[in-house]
Image (cartoon, rainbow, N blue to C red):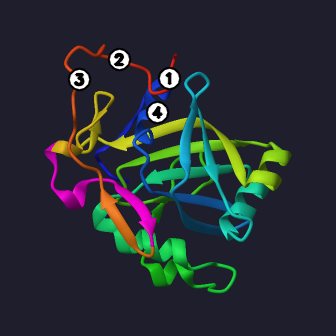
Amino acid sequence: MNQFMKAVDLAKAYRLINHGPATLVSARHDGTENVMAASWVCGLEFDPARLTVVLDKGAFTRRLIEQSRSFVIQVPLASQASLVYHLGSHSLFSEKDKLTRSGVSLFSLPGTDVPLVSGCAAWLYCELIPEEHNQQTYDLFIGEIKSAWADSRFFRDGHWQFEHLPADQRSLHYIAGGHFYTTGDAIEIADAPAETPGASEK
C-alpha cells in the first residue's frame, strides 16, 4: 500500500472526480478480477456520497459489478496513460491474460473485496445501487461511495495540487483514438466563497 494514501472525507469525495478525469474501474467476483477505463464518471450526490458511471454492455467489468455489486473508481496519472489506454482497449472476454499483458499492479485493502490499481492519485470504493432500467437502457450505473482515499502528494486538505506538479503527475482527460490531455493550471475567482459546492444550486 502507498504510504501517501490517506482517507478522504466522504463529503468531499466528489472533488476527486469533479474535474472530469479519465478513470479506471476495477471489480472482482468469484475469483475473477478486471480493470477497465471509463471517461464518463460523474458526481451525483454529496450526502450520501454517490456517483454515476457509464459501462457499456460489452465490458467484462460491467458483468463483475452486476454480480458483486461493488467496484472502485481510480484517478490515474498522466504517467499511466499507456496503461489506461491498454486497459480500455482490450477485453477480458477475448484476452484472458489482459491484466498480465497490461502490466497493471493491483493491491487490496481490509474490508473491501475489490482490487485497487497501484500508482493512481485517488480511489473511490463504491457499492452498487441497482437500477435495472437505467443500467439496461442507458448503461448508467449508480454507486454509493463508501470509502475514498487520495495520494497526499496530489490531493490534500480537500484540494488537488496539480498546478504545482509536473505534467506527468497530473490527471488525464481522454478524447478519442489514444489522444489524451492532462489537467491544466488552476484559475481562482477572487471573490468566490471558499467552499462553493460542485453542483449548481441555481
Mark 4–mark 3 CB contact (< 8 Å): no
* Residue where numbered disc 4 is placed: 13
Q: Is residue 79 or residue 177 the one in the foreground?
A: 177
What residue occupies the far front of the structure in this picture? 202
- Mark nearest the camera among 3 and 2 is 3
Name the residue type under label 4. Ala
Mark 3–mark 2 CB contact (< 8 Å): no
Query: Which tag, 2 or 1, sits closer to the chain's start?
Result: 2
Mark 4–mark 1 CB contact (< 8 Å): no
What residue is drawn where x is 19% and y is 19%? 190
Query: Which tag, 4 or 3, sits closer to the chain's start?
Result: 4
Residue 160 drawn above or below residue 35: above
Q: Quadrant of residue 163?
A: top left
Mark 2–mark 4 CB contact (< 8 Å): no
User: What crowding class fits label 1: few (fewer than 14 Cα within 10 Å), some (14-19), or many (20 or more)?
Assistant: few
Name the residue type under label 2. Glu
Q: Which mark is residue 195?
A: 2
Q: Is residue 182 or residue 30 the one in the foreground?
A: 182
